[in-house]
Amino acid sequence: MRDCFLKAAARRAKKIGGRKITPKVEFSIHRDFPNHAVPANDPLLKTLINTGKKQGIKLTPVVSGGGADANIFYGKGINTVNLGTGMWEVHTVREYLDLNDFFTSAGLVLDTLQEAGRN
């Protein structure tokens, strides 16, 4: 992304009064959320996926980007995964919560915690 901005600024260079003037681009990066990268062999993730299988739910880990509470917990050393809760069209005026998905997720979390407690 940085290179794109620098190239765009360079393309906007103009000669004014015989001098070449190029827009100046400055960058400041501030990380709002720590990275959250759960390895495929993570015990909590494995337990969650196995619990889902028992309930007939196929869970597929994906990289989603963005930030969530899970990033903060993970950044503080608390092992966690980010599980969908039935939210759709998030951060839009059409955002809504599918209650069936929501309660399915809640049951999945409860069963996963119970399974993790047995191990």
Image (tube, rainbow, N blue to C red):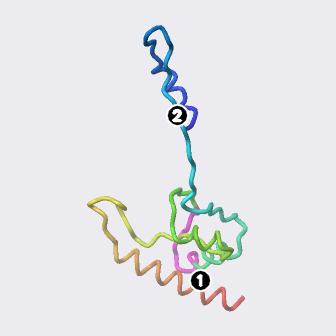
- In depth, the one of 24 and 90 nearer the eye is 24
Q: Which mark is residue 112?
A: 1
Q: Which mark is residue 25?
A: 2
Say what amino acid the circle numbered 1 marks. Thr
Quarter of the rendering containing residue 88:
bottom left
Residue lying at the far left of the rendered structure:
93
Gap in angstroms between the C-alphas marked 2 and 1:
49 Å
- In depth, the one of 15 and 98 nearer the eye is 15
Q: Is residue 46 above or below residue 16?
A: below
Residue 1 is left or right of residue 118, and the answer is: left
The image position of residue 66, as x and y in percent, is: 50, 58
Magenta part of the protein: which range?
52-61
The image position of residue 85, as x and y in percent, is: 44, 73
- In depth, the one of 54 and 72 nearer the eye is 72
The image position of residue 40, as x and y in percent, is: 69, 64
Q: Is residue 110 above or below residue 46?
A: below
Classify the position of the C terminus by image quarter: bottom right
Say what amino acid the circle numbered 2 marks. Val
- SS of the residue under disc 1: helix
Residue 76 is left or right of residue 82, and the answer is: right
Residue 101 is left or right of residue 77, and the answer is: left
- In depth, the one of 9 and 92 nearer the eye is 9
Quarter of the rendering containing residue 114:
bottom right
> Of discs 2 and 1, which sits in the foreground?
2
Q: Is residue 89 above or below residue 2?
A: below
Q: Name the residue located 57 percent from the left edge and 37 percent from the top edge.
A: 2
Q: Name the residue located 48 percent from the left edge and 84 percent from the top edge.
A: 107
Contact (Cβ within 8 Å) of mark 2 with mark 1 = no
Q: Is residue 83 above or below residue 25?
A: below
Mark 2 or 1, nearer chain start: 2
Q: Name the residue located 64 percent from the left edge and 69 percent from the top edge.
A: 75
Tell me the crowding category of disc 2: few under 14, some 14 to 19, or many 20 or more residues within 10 angstroms, Cα based.
Answer: few
